[in-house]
Each structure stands twice: as C-alpha cells, then as structure tokens.
Amino acid sequence: MASRESTQGSWSSSLAFILAGAGIAIGFSNFWGIPGLVAAYGGGAFLLLYFVGLLLMGLPLLMSELILGSRGRQNPVGTLQTLAIVAGHHPAWKYLGLACVMTAILILSYYGVVYGWALGYLFRSIMGKFSGQTAQGIETIFSSFVSNPEVLLAWHTVFMAATSAIVARGVRNGLEITNRWLVGIMAGILLLLLAYSFLSETFTTTLANTFTVDFSRMSLIGFMEAMKYAFYSLAVGFGLYLVYGSYMPRKASILNCSVWIIVIDVVVAIVATIIIFNLIAHSNLQLTDGDTLLFLTIPQGFSHVHGGVIWTTLFYLVLVCAALTSSIALLETAVSWVIDRFAMRRIRATIIVGLIAWLIGIMTTLSFNQQSPLRFVFRYAGERHEYGLFTILEVIAGNILVPLLAIGLLFFTVWKMNRDAVRDELNIRDGLGYTVWRGLAGIVAPGMIFLVFLYNNGIISLK
C-alpha cells in the first residue's frame, strides 16, 4: 500500500514538523521533573542513563509512531485498521488506536486543569502578586488558588478555549503556525533566563552540580527513575506522534526528524535544569519537585531579585507555551478521529471534543477543594495520594494505559505491519541498520517499557 495524503493537510516542511514534534515533547516534565532527579541521582550520572533510555526506548518508540502515521495517513483508529488489513490481519487492531484517542482525551482533561494553573500564574506574575512575598505569603497564594474551584474552572475554561481555537484552524493555519511561534518564544525566553543565570555568582557551581558525573549517588531507584523519565518525557506511546506523523511531508526522514525532536527536548530539559538549579542556589532555597517547585519555589526564588516581576513573568510564559504545544497535540489526536469517523467539519469536531475534555476537567478541579467529595486520600503503588479523582485519572491514563499502549504500538509496527512498508518508510533495506532498529523496537524497548510499567505501579518495589 502506497502512503497517501492525509485529508487533514500536511506540514509545509520537515522543519515545521520537527518544531511541532518538539512542541509535543516539551512539557511540564522538562521543568518539574528532571531538576530534582538530576540533583538526587548524581548529576551527570542521571543524565547519562537518561540519554541511554532515550536511545534504547524513546527513539524506537517515536520512530514507530511516525512510521505508522506516515504510512497510514489517517487518525490512529483508521491507520491501525488499514495497515492491519493490508498486512493480512484482523481489523480489530483499530481498537488499539481507539484506546489511544480515549487516552489523549483523558490526559487533556486533567492536564488542562494544571495547564490552567500556569495561565493563572502568568497573569498573577504580570500583576506583581509575587513581588516581595515571603515563603508563607506565596504558599497562601497557592493554597487559595488551587482550593477555589471557581478560579480553577475559569482558568481551565480559558485554556481549553485557547487550545480549541488553535486546533479548529487546521494543520497549516492552526497547529503549524502556533508551534512555530510558541517553540520560538520558548527558545528565546530560555536563552534570556540562561543568560541571566550566567551573570550570577552561583553559575559555575550550578554547572558542576548539573554535569559532574557522580555514580556514587546513583542507585537502582535512580536507574529506574531515569528510564521512567526517558519514557514519559517525550509524550510518546499513545498516538500523538502518529497523528502528527500522518501530516509529514513525503520527503521527510523519520530518523532525522526523530533525532532532532529528541535533541531539542533534551536541550530544553538541561537548560531548564540549569536555570532552576541556579535560581535555587542564588536564593538559598530548598530544591523541590512537581507543582511545589513550579508554583511555590520558583515564585519565591524570583520574588526578591532585581527585576523579579519580569523574570517570573517570562518563566510562566514559557510554561504556558509548553502547555499549549502539548494540549493542541492531545486535542488534535481525538479531533482527527472524530472528523474521519463521523464525516464532521473540523470546527464542530473540535468544539465537541473540547467540551468533553472540559467537562471531565470540571470534575478534576473539584479534586483540589478540601470540602469536595472528589478530593480524598488513598494509597497506590506504596505512595499516599490526596487529590482523589485527579490522581485516579492520572494513574489510569499515565501509569497504566500509556505504557501498555506504547508496547502495543511497538508490537504492531515490528511484528504485524508489512515489513516492506516499514523499510519503505525508514528508507532502508535489509541490513544491519534495519536489524538494529527491529531489535530495539521489537525487543529492547518493549521490555524496558514493561519494567517502567511494573515500577511505576508498585509491582516492582525498590524502596
């Protein structure tokens, strides 16, 4: 089967696709995940293992999604159904694609709430709400923000409306233009923040803490955390790149594009780590992670420096850009299926899918209110969780569905898809290169992802 053009359009160039793909990869994990892990597990030692994980697991999985998308030129459901039939297999493989679509909606529903936090904090930083605040004052701002369902709903609504408006404009006029601008804005701001860090007296120490290889602080837990981060940091495994890959220019190299997407993601993660490390050292603060780092520690660190309002605003602008480039890919994955399945116009399909994600998100916002029945404490994988429904959705989608779907996509690409079609998309014949890729994508990567699945769900306990 010769690949055909997607009915949704295509990227104008390989560069446009690379920027869009990088937009998927650059997310909150670059900012709230890797700094704490680098600090805890030996600086450069963690980075080295993270690179190994990307090479053995992230790259084969990313390439597999792009192979499927480029060959099928449809939404995840249509692509897997068509490719399965062409290869002589049962069309029931389409349900793997449908699971990808449902997972994308689920992830957008709860991450859309957190992305709304970044938007709310951007406007608070512009208004100077964090300037001169004490640690207690910033904690009070955050507590009142997340515990107010009306405020969370408002920002969640604004963010989802912005995401829907972009997707409704289509591939060229919406996704491509937005990714081109937002990735460019992120790059410019990160360079400014890096230059600001360079002028600090703690910059040399920051570089040493980031890149010095100290395997004495590495452990089996650190190894698994590096593999976990290598898997999750690219946002691979549940069809986002499959959809974006269906819009790839015919002459684009899947290997080259994949490598560039990973390189951009890694550079952003390292630059973000340097910026955050330096701010923590300069302000004599304790390094934290997750939402505590982004919404408590960061504003506290910038609150008493010269030009703090500007630097805080720029930081949250980066977060908002990263949130939008991720959210439009999540929404597009579902919208592309609705358009094809129901022969629906893009604007109408976007409104329907956006409303579904928004409605689920409304329930998620209540997970942060102390009086809400949707906020409750439970234990999972040996850890205590207090955000009720929010965490349950995160566990179902992130811990369970995404790794299992990733293994499914790899299995289909390597063992079920027509081999000539795979070689054609990779532009390679039988030989060492194809054998290596097949071994990584068919054996090594699925095995490593399954280990991450077991570790992330507490089935393998190392603590």
Image: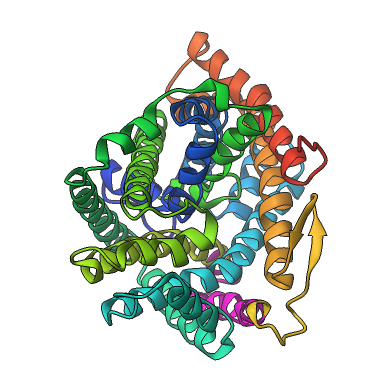
Of residues 380 and 69, the one nearer the viewer is: 380
Of residues 371 and 324, the one nearer the viewer is: 371
Relative image position of residue 37 (x, y in whole percent): 53, 40
Q: Where, quadrant-wise, is the C terminus in this rendering?
A: top right
Of residues 151 and 284, the one nearer the viewer is: 284
**52 up-or-down from 403: above or below:** above
The residue at the point 33 percent across, 55 percent down is: 283
- Is residue 144 visible in the rendered image? The answer is yes
Q: Where, quadrant-wise, is the N terminus in this rendering?
A: top right
| Location of residue 101 by image quarter | bottom right
- Is residue 234 visible in the rendered image? The answer is no
The residue at the point 44 percent across, 23 percent down is: 213
**276 up-or-down from 151: above or below:** above
Q: How is the image coloured?
A: rainbow
Q: Is residue 352 magenta?
A: yes
Relative image position of residue 351 (x, y in whole percent): 50, 80
Q: Is residue 126 magenta?
A: no
Where are the magenta residues, as a range? 338-366
Relative image position of residue 55 (x, y in whole percent): 50, 26
**378 up-or-down from 137: above or below:** above
The residue at the point 37 percent across, 50 percent down is: 276
Relative image position of residue 275 (x, y in whole percent): 32, 48
